[in-house]
Amino acid sequence: MSVLPLTHSAFAAANSAVRRPPVDSSRANLVLNRFRVAVLALTLVWGNAASAAAQTTGVPDGGPDPASVRMRVGPLWMAPRLELENFGVDTNVFNEPDDQNPKRDFTFTLTPKMDMWLRMGRSWLRFTIAEDLVWYQQYSSQRSANSHYDLSWRLPLNRLALTVSPTYLSTNERPGFEIDARIHHTEWGGNGSLDVRAFPKTSFGITGSYRDITFDDSAVYEGTNVAHELDRTEATAGVTVSHDLTPLTKVVFSATQERDRFKNGPLRDSDSTSVTGSVAFDPHALLKGGASFGFRDFRPLDSSLGGYRGLIASGDLTYTLLGATRFQVQFGRDVQYSYDVNQPYYLQTGVNGSIAQQIFGPFDAIARAGTARLAYQDRADTLVGVANRVDYNHTYGGGLGYHFSSGLRVGFNVDYFNRITDVQQRRYTGLRYGASTTYDF
């Protein structure tokens, strides 16, 4: 269950082992080798694509936007992108409390990314590859190469439309706001749907999804083996009704059943039923993105756990005013699983927002803020450190940027982050500041 596109206890020895592991030279060499391969591949693709024609008169549903994709080799369209983020200082690498002498380090993240579209008859096959190459100068254990692959294929068949979207993620990033250690885990699975257009603007469909989440067997956090507690599979099945309000706006009503099963113990096994209504806006609309609101009946199978019946939500909306000011908001509310055996899940509610303003000419500025509330569910008849615990995570930041005519943007960013909680050893504050660069080929 995911809430937001956001990223981010008791035994001192285990905590030290997770937060300050020894230098792993083999991992550092692996990161460097993958970095060289990614840069070489991007260079070869650029060299081949630059010589190809890139003009077109239009594309069918699911294809690329001709105005934003400038590379084409026969039926293959490509949009390479190179991002350099967080090129600067992280003042709290391990999210340690202020009284434990937080460690700082120089860091950066380099992300070669490629979006590709392949024409296949009446349909388009889309493939996205992204490789995050994370570097820390002193704490080499925090270096990683994170891979993300997404495939999407939509096949229109007169009144039928079939969509298949497998995905794979291998990452060392923090699993969420709760766990402060960067622990390697993989996620693979996908979703599919079959829609039948019964009326000119109305369709009925069935949907399904599957996700497998696996952590490294050796990953220990706060004295807990994370793999033993959180390795799981999530499967859903549902029905939908969608209606085109306008050529750029669609509303969807859905009813979904979800079945979560944990691989190493049934404590957190659960079944859920959710009913949602959502609205989606076309990328060419003035308001872009989508939002969903609904009701979830979350039912743990273990009698020692209470369930949750209430509101869930998710959304990612962007609005541009007069071509110079961009507003973006992301929000979410849903159940998330905890590594803590005595507080096995929590309700996460959060919102992120940003305002980007073109100042003059090629200069722009951005301000952003976000908050997340984690409300834990206590397990019955067990001793917990803080009953009915509620944690808050906050981020505040901003930056300045300069756009070059070649598709290059260079910026400088500052971001402050903290956690507020009744568990004293889990409180922290930190600051990240440095440069960022984005280049669209």
Image: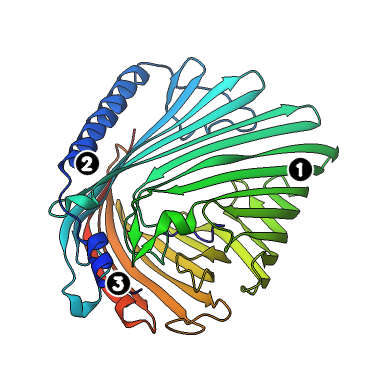
Which of labels 3 and 2 is toward the front? Answer: 3
Answer with the quarter of the image where residue 27 lies: top left
Residue 175 shown left or right of residue 399 in the figure: right
Residue 11 disc label: 3
In three-dimensional space, the C-alpha distance between marks 3 and 2, rounded to whole angstroms, equals 27 Å
> First in sequence: mark 1 or mark 2?
2
**Considering only vertical position in the picture, is 137 above or below 303?**
above
Residue 117, image x, y percentages: 51, 27
Q: Residues within 10 Å of mark 3 (few under 14, many from 20)?
A: few
Residue 339, image x, y percentages: 45, 64
Whether residue 322 is visible to the viewer of this picture, yes or no, is no
- Would you name the residue on which mark 2 appears? 27
Label 2 secondary element: helix
- Would you name the residue on which mark 1 appears? 206
Looking at this rendering, what residue extends furthest in the right direction?
A: 199
Residue 403 shown left or right of residue 177 in the figure: left
Give amino acid for label 1: Ile
